[in-house]
Image (spheres, rainbow, N blue to C red):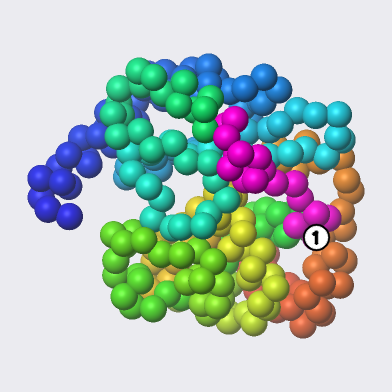
Amino acid sequence: MTSDEERDAALLAAQTSTPQFRQALQAAVQAGLPVGVQLVAANFARSSASSYWLLRWLSPDALPVWLTLRIATHPHWLTHVQQVEVVWPKLPDLTGLADAIGQALTDAAAAAARYQFTPLELAILKQLMVLAEHKLVWLVQMPPAMALSHKGRSFDLQNDFRRLPLFLGDRNNVNNRLTPVHATAFQDKLIDFFGANLLFSQFSSHYMLKLLPTIQWLKPMLAADPRAVNWQTQLAAAYGQDFCATVAQAIRPHRINR
């Protein structure tokens, strides 16, 4: 990115981070929602104009149906994510955005992007919340070329991320008690969550990418689901006692030091 591009990006980020702009953007999103769709939560990128919106489809089904909407000036740096994307280069101008959102959400691709959770996925979400309470986070270690690009080039979520080395570590210091974890099926679920913005990324040292839970989304999602899930039992049955013991051992010193 050239110095002019960096300056323009910083200016746009400043223009789109004000409370007034975010209120106007939320009003545009609300205006674009089809009948029977509810806006539940939102989160905003720190260094760009990108925003993410958690939508819920209201239906007679007791189990919630969710969709992730992304609004940005540029395409996502990852392909094959589970999101509906509205690329809007005119930001901060919102003229016409509500109509574009409405069209995107009634497209066939939007129906395909909706998701519901299985009991196992609910158990993983609950584990993510527990880990966050103990300041622990899941990480993947990227090849140097991928890490050094810092979102400057596109990667395929399905092919480039699923088999990266997985670790559990300290959210604030990745050098502290970094534990390798080998659980392919579990990692697949994390990558699926990342693709729906239930986890968001943060680059760290040693080519590590933190997968941080989007807490302001997970809380209402778990609260809206009527199923009672014993997350520890579910995860032990799915991924084995060794996996659960590794996670419990990582939690233990953090519980002591809190």
Asked if residue 6 lies left or right of residue 78, the reply is: left
What is the crowding at mark 1: few (fewer than 14 residues within 10 Å), some, or many (at least 20)? some
Residue 225 percent location from the top left of the image: 81, 41
Q: Quadrant of residue 58?
A: top right
Q: Magenta stretch containing residue 108, yes or no?
A: yes
Q: Quadrant of residue 127?
A: bottom right
In the rendered image, the quadrant that contains the N terminus is bottom left
| Residue under the image location 75 percent in, 57 percent down | 121
How many marks the image carries: the answer is 1
Work out whether residue 49 can be spotted: no
**What is the magenta range?**
105-121
Q: Nearer the viewer, residue 235 or 251?
A: 235
Q: Magenta stretch containing residue 145, yes or no?
A: no
In the rendered image, the quadrant that contains the C terminus is bottom right
| Residue under the image location 54 percent in, 66 percent down | 158
Work out whether residue 38 can be spotted: yes
Farthest residue toward the front? 108
- Identify the element where label 1 is drawn: helix
Q: What is the three-letter code of the residue carrying label 1?
A: Leu
Q: Nearer the viewer, residue 124 or 70?
A: 70
Looking at the image, is 183 positioned above or below residue 216? below
Looking at the image, is 236 positioned above or below residue 192? below
| Residue under the image location 78 percent in, 75 percent down | 239
Looking at the image, is 26 positioned above or below residue 45? above
Asked if residue 71 lies left or right of residue 112, the reply is: left
| Residue under the image location 52 percent in, 27 percent down | 103
Q: Which residue is mark 1?
A: 120
Residue 16 percent location from the top left of the image: 32, 30
Residue 15 percent location from the top left of the image: 27, 28
Looking at the image, is 70 positioned above or below residue 235? above
